[in-house]
Amino acid sequence: MIKTLMGCIREYKKPSILTPIYVSVEVIVECIIPFFIAKLINHIEDGSETRLVLLYGAALIGLAFISLFFGALAGSTCATASSGFAKNIRHDLFYKVQEFSFANIDRFSTSSLVTRLTTDVTNVQMAYMMVIRIAVRAPFMMIFSAIMAFAMCPQLSTVYIIILPFLAFALFFIVKKAMPLFNSVFKKYDKLNNSIQENVKGMRVVKSFVREEYEKQKFGKAADDVCADFTKAEKIVALNMPIMQLAMYIAMVVVSFLGARLIISTGGSVMGVGDLSSLFTYGMQILSSLMMLSMIFVMISISDASMRRICEVLKEESTIKNPENPVMEVTDGSIDFNGVSFKYHENAEKNALEDIELHIKSGETIGVLGGTGSSKSTLIQLISRLYDTSVGSVYVGGINVKDYDIEVLRDAVSVVLQKNVLFSGTIKENLRWGDKDASDEELVRVCKLAQADEFINSFPDKYDTFIEQGGTNVSGGQKQRLCIARALLKKPKILILDDSTSAVDTKTDALIRSAFASEIPDTTKIIIAQRISSVQDADRIIIMNDGKIDAIGTHEELLAGNDIYREVYYSQNRAGEE
């Protein structure tokens, strides 16, 4: 895990190395200052001349500025290193997610990935900041302060050494109790983020069904779960401060009592008032260093779960990879399913697709009909290799899809989903997802094919109209037509419409299909639909039922010989039948 995360430091190695060096110099100087203060007080007590006092004073000012200078340098390099480290982690996480197949994405929920990219990365950033600065400062300060304290008075310094094991045991107990709670809270963070994401995304549905109160209760429960775990953990961690302070005050009282007796009994020959004052300072530094270490342990306890969750994503290998020598061209839009069976998870009891044998010629128009859950969408996802087959093979252009370069294959296959996504930006910017170099004339041409040009020109800003996130300021039918135009701009060998005209009227649907037939006759077109009118004119129609192909034929053949098709046809044309 540490090795994986260390790989994210990269160009920030220099500030990561300089920070501990600067901190070390700062600590050494801070530990020297109380020694000079002790000498100064002792000289003042002995009635030394002003010149010597001024000399010690100048030395103390110089040491203070040196400590301040190196402390400021350490703070600057630490901020650079930790922020850059977090930036690289987010970069690597985001790029890794882009490489994932659908199977990988199914393994991580969207809300969980969002938590890992935000909260988890912030926790790791804070831990890294502590590791390269405070985790160096605290032990160095403890060691050097103990050395200086022993150099001044070994008898009294033993008090600090005796009390350290008790504090270490208390710290170990606190961390042991708090760590499991911090580990569990991040799973509840995922549920909280999921509640927020679902609510915001489905706000229109929530309001239309007047479910605001239910959503508030659901969110409140998730928030209360997170709060309860954090409260319990923080209560345990909060014990750290009073325990440390109690130990510090006990040590101060004991040192004060023994030191005063030693000074009085020896007449100041063994230890002076300045030495006792510096011992207090060193004691404070030793115990405060231990408090810093406890903070580091707590932060690492919190970030340990975050680090593991981040590494889960970084170490996840995509289930779909490019071959060593990929084919870099799709020659035509022919499609062949050879004995294909597929399940979403290897441990699934039932196949989503079973014994699919299907052969489609380039340029054919194929309709696909079937009830909900008949695996229509699953079938087409294998064509662009969003998933790999469990059994059998899929060929495009006469070549196994596993032999293609993934980008080349997916550029040749355009898929328009029923719930396709538009991104925030202008209509032009959204359309150019299909071809970033497309001219304005090409944009207009594909929009006319998709029957989108007319409504676009009705907007005041026409093709420069700004689309809100998710396309919330256009209707469902307008969104679908824009997505169809975007897909056409790729000039695909295969165009798949996955129920993507469900929100347009039958006349517009017919105009879109007519435009396809006349303008892109060489493109293989697969139309998944619920309306028979959308596929009635297709060269062949596939009837899917329970993950299997029930029948293949023309409209007339299926009407005459397939019960499922006939039932759907008459239910949709009941008025005409009567």
Image (cartoon, rainbow, N blue to C red):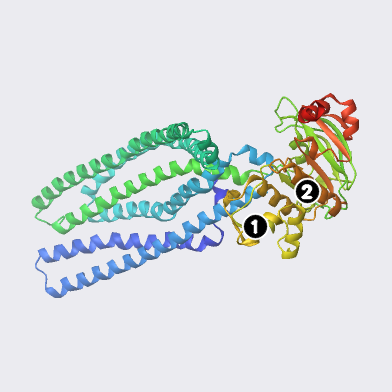
Task: List x then y, in percent, for residue 466.
Answer: 59, 58
Q: Where does label 1 land, which residue?
A: 458
Q: Is residue 14 visible?
A: yes
Q: Quadrant of residue 446?
A: bottom right
366 sits to left or right of 305: right
Task: List x then y, in percent, for residue 273.
Answer: 13, 57
Query: Of helix, strand and loop, which one carries label 2?
Result: helix
Q: Amino acid at mark 1?
A: Ser
Question: Decide: marks 2, 1 in contact (CB < 8 A)?
Answer: no
Relative vertical location of residue 66 with respect to residue 264 in this rendering, above or below? below
State which tag comes first along the sequence, 2 or 1.
1
Query: Of helix, strand and loop, which one carries label 1?
Result: loop
Mark carried by residue 512: 2
Relative vertical location of residue 488 with respect to residue 253 in this rendering, above or below? below
Q: Amino acid at mark 2?
A: Ile
157 sits to left or right of 13: left
Locate the N terminus by quadrant: top right
Q: Quadrant of residue 56?
A: bottom left
Can you tell which of label 2 and label 1 is closer to the viewer?
1
Q: Which sits in the foreground, 293 or 339? A: 339
Task: List x then y, in percent, for residue 158.
Answer: 25, 46
**Mark 2 nearby-residue class (10 Å; few <14, some 14–19, many ≥20):** many
